[in-house]
């Protein structure tokens, strides 16, 4: 037995490319359906878990899926905005507290989430290092952001410009990391949280600049009409909020008109939740969603696709098994001389068939081991990968 | 050592038939078999080795009656009792030299590769002049070197009988002499019996006896 295994191993080593192709083919046939099943299952669990923890979501009318993906998973396209006044209107119903969300800007590939401190308690997020954000221009970063960008409290990061060529567009804002969140093992780990007003400053709805009343800004003054001073383009605008210039930051117009992506209503109780759903039903501008229902619809589509893919993989598997069998049968014919030699030397009648069975067994064992490794890797990283794909 | 009596053999569907009333080869004898192609020389070697079975008659090798043994016993007997050398070497391309020499131990029931066997394989390789090529593969060797590997494989278990089917048929003149001398030297030093099929009449003077298969039904013995 040991001798046969050794000869089989030597044969496979000698024909290493043929063996590698066989092992790869069998590995894929075993792994792909398993891996797909695993990834879809994991993704479904993760996605529905977050949707379950977000009972309601309020946004402007448009694609419900886009709204849920953007506001809960910080990815996908931009839903049409609603205004901050929506939070006041919601809280005016006395049925829920509204947690505002503005997810539009990015920094080094990570989403900047403008929100209020209520978001942290709503999601159960805890500070692992540093402190909570307390003033304009400060951020709290998720655990993965901190790890990947090497950030710690006191470091800074800069928001990404939306368009390099738009002179009147969104300019980068340098922000200070006040704290790092403990890992939550969900989308919050990959987000940069800041105060809502900071995101409005990034957008240019609020700004800080030189005090025109001071002598060093005299060159920037175009004209004075009583209390109203008109400045020219040489006026120094701040792209970082510091203790020295924070007082110069101000917003023009009412904050009620400033944009949000969505509001997370936290109903006081089940009755309030149902009443809220009724209150917003038929609203021509706004939609109040139950994220779980939206995600279930998405996952129904994913599962339907998965079923088709599994059937296709099954057919590919049968074809591959047939090809592998053919390879071994052809090999059996091609090895007639070897079989005769072994027999004439005194090898047992079943030696060559035993040799081929051992070769098949080794190929299968290698394939299953490789498939197990890939499945393990999928278990660890696959869910996040598919989530990223689905979210796009 | 070898005794054949009243042997009758034919291949199914073929006109070929082999009739041998009596043939005896003594222990320690080196015998050559010559004759035209198709005269039955290789068939007789296969009958003696138990690779094929006769229709009638008896073949005795040592104390064993080959045609009375079971298939498994014949195979086991062949591995440990008979060293076989072929014209086309019949090495396994995927095994290095050392494993080709050790092959009988890997395919024989109840046999295993021991440190002693490895040493014996290395000594044999050294003896036949390929001691530095143990890890090479057959494709990396010359024809002469391949046949020397095959000779080493045949001699690994120190068989009392060596059957060689045109062992020099594919070799150049210098290797012919070398391979034949290796086989004859083994016979001289171990007292084993050698039966060789050959077409090479220049080599016949090295043998004690020549069996000439001029006609498939009538072979003539020539003592040298």
Image (tube, grey):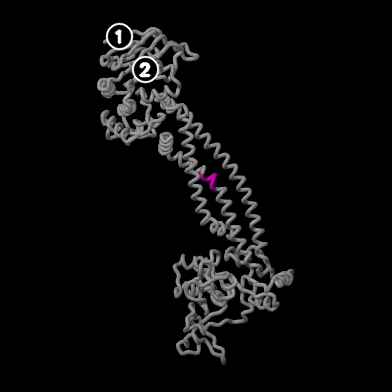
Residue at horizontal 46 percent and vertical 90 percent from the top:
A215
Left or right, A31 with respect to B42, comes to: right
Image location (x, y in percent) of residue B200: 31, 16
Q: Quadrant of residue B88?
A: top left
Image vertical order of residue B103 relative to residue A392, above or below = above
For label 2, the SS is: loop
Residue at horizontal 46 percent and vertical 30 percent from the top:
A352
Circle 1 sits on which residue? B222
Image vertical order of residue A328 relative to residue A92, above or below = above
- In the rendered image, the residue lying farthest to the bottom is A226
Q: Quadrant of residue B210?
A: top left
Image location (x, y in percent) of residue A252: 59, 82
Q: Is residue A23 visible?
A: yes
Left or right, A334 with respect to B101, comes to: right
What kind of secondary structure does the magenta stretch mostly adopt?
A: helix
In the rendered image, residue A166 lying in the magenta stretch gets the answer no
Measure the C-alpha gap from mark 2 to mark 1.
26 Å
Q: Are marks 2 and 1 on the same chain?
A: yes
- In the rendered image, the residue lying farthest to the front is B63
Q: Is residue B16 visible?
A: no
Q: Quadrant of the C terminus of chain A?
A: bottom right
Image vertical order of residue A215 relative to residue B73, above or below = below
Residue count near mark 1 (Cα–Cα under 10 Å), binned few <14, some 14–19, many ≥20: few
Specify start and end residues of the magenta stretch as a single range. Answer: A27-31
**Pointer 2 or 1: first along the chain:** 2
Circle 2 sits on which residue? B63
């Amino acid at each position: 037995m040991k001798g046969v295994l050794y000869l089989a191993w030597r044969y496979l080593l000698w024909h290493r490319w043929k063996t590698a192709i066989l092992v790869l083919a069998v590995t894929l046939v075993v792994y792909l359906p398993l891996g797909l099943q695993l990834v879809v299952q994991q993704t479904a669990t993760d996605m529905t878990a977050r949707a379950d923890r977000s009972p309601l979501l309020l946004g402007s009318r448009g694609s419900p899926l886009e709204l849920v993906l953007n506001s809960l998973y910080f990815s996908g396209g931009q839903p049409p905005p609603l205004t901050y006044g929506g939070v006041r209107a919601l809280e005016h119903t006395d049925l829920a507290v509204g947690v505002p969300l503005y997810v539009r800007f990015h920094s080094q590939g990570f989403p900047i989430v403008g929100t209020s401190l209520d978001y942290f308690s709503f999601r159960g997020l805890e500070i692992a290092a540093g402190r909570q954000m307390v003033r304009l221009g400060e951020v709290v970063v998720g655990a993965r952001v901190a790890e990947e960008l090497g950030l710690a409290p006191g470091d800074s990061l800069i928001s990404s410009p939306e368009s390099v060529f738009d002179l009147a567009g969104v300019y980068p804002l340098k922000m200070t990391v006040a704290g790092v969140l403990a890992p939550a093992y969900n989308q919050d780990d990959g987000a940069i949280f800041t105060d809502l007003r900071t995101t409005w400053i990034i957008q240019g709805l609020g700004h800080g600049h030189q005090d025109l009343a001071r002598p060093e800004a005299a060159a920037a003054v175009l004209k004075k009409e009583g209390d109203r001073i008109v400045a020219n383009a040489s006026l120094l605008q701040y792209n970082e909020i510091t203790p020295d210039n924070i007082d110069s930051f101000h917003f023009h117009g009412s904050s009620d008109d400033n944009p949000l992506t969505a509001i997370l209503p936290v109903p006081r109780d089940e009755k309030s939740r149902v009443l809220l759903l009724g209150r917003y039903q038929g609203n021509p501008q706004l939609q109040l969603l139950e994220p779980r229902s939206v995600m279930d619809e998405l996952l129904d589509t994913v599962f339907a696709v998965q079923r088709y893919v599994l059937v296709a993989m099954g057919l590919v598997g049968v074809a591959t098994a047939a090809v592998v069998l053919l390879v071994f049968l052809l090999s059996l014919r091609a090895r007639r001389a070897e079989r005769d030699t072994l027999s004439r030397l005194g090898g047992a009648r079943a030696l060559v068939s035993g040799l081929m069975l051992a070769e098949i067994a080794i190929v299968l064992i290698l394939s299953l081991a490789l498939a197990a490794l890939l499945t393990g890797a999928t278990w660890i990283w696959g869910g996040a990968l598919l989530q990223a794909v689905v979210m796009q | 050592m070898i005794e054949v009596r009243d042997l009758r053999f034919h291949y199914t569907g073929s006109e070929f038939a082999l009739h041998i009333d009596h043939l005896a080869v003594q222990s320690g004898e080196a015998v050559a078999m010559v004759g035209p192609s198709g005269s039955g020389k290789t068939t007789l070697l296969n009958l003696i080795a138990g690779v094929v079975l006769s229709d009638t008659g008896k073949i005795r090798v040592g104390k064993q009656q080959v045609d009375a043994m079971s298939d498994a016993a014949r195979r086991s007997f062949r591995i440990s009792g008979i060293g076989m050398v072929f014209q086309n070497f019949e090495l396994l391309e995927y095994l290095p030299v050392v494993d080709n020499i050790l092959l009988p131990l890997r395919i024989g029931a109840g046999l295993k590769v021991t440190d002693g066997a490895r040493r014996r394989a290395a000594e044999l390789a050294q003896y036949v002049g390929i001691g530095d090529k143990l890890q090479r593969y057959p494709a990396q060797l010359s024809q002469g070197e391949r046949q020397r590997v095959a000779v080493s494989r045949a001699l690994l278990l120190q068989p009392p009988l060596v059957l060689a089917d045109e062992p020099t048929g594919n070799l150049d003149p210098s290797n012919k002499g070398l391979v034949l001398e290796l086989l004859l030297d083994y016979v001289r030093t171990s007292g084993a019996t050698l039966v060789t099929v050959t077409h090479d009449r220049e080599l016949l003077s090295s043998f004690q006896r020549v069996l000439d298969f001029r006609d498939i039904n009538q072979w003539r013995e020539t003592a040298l």
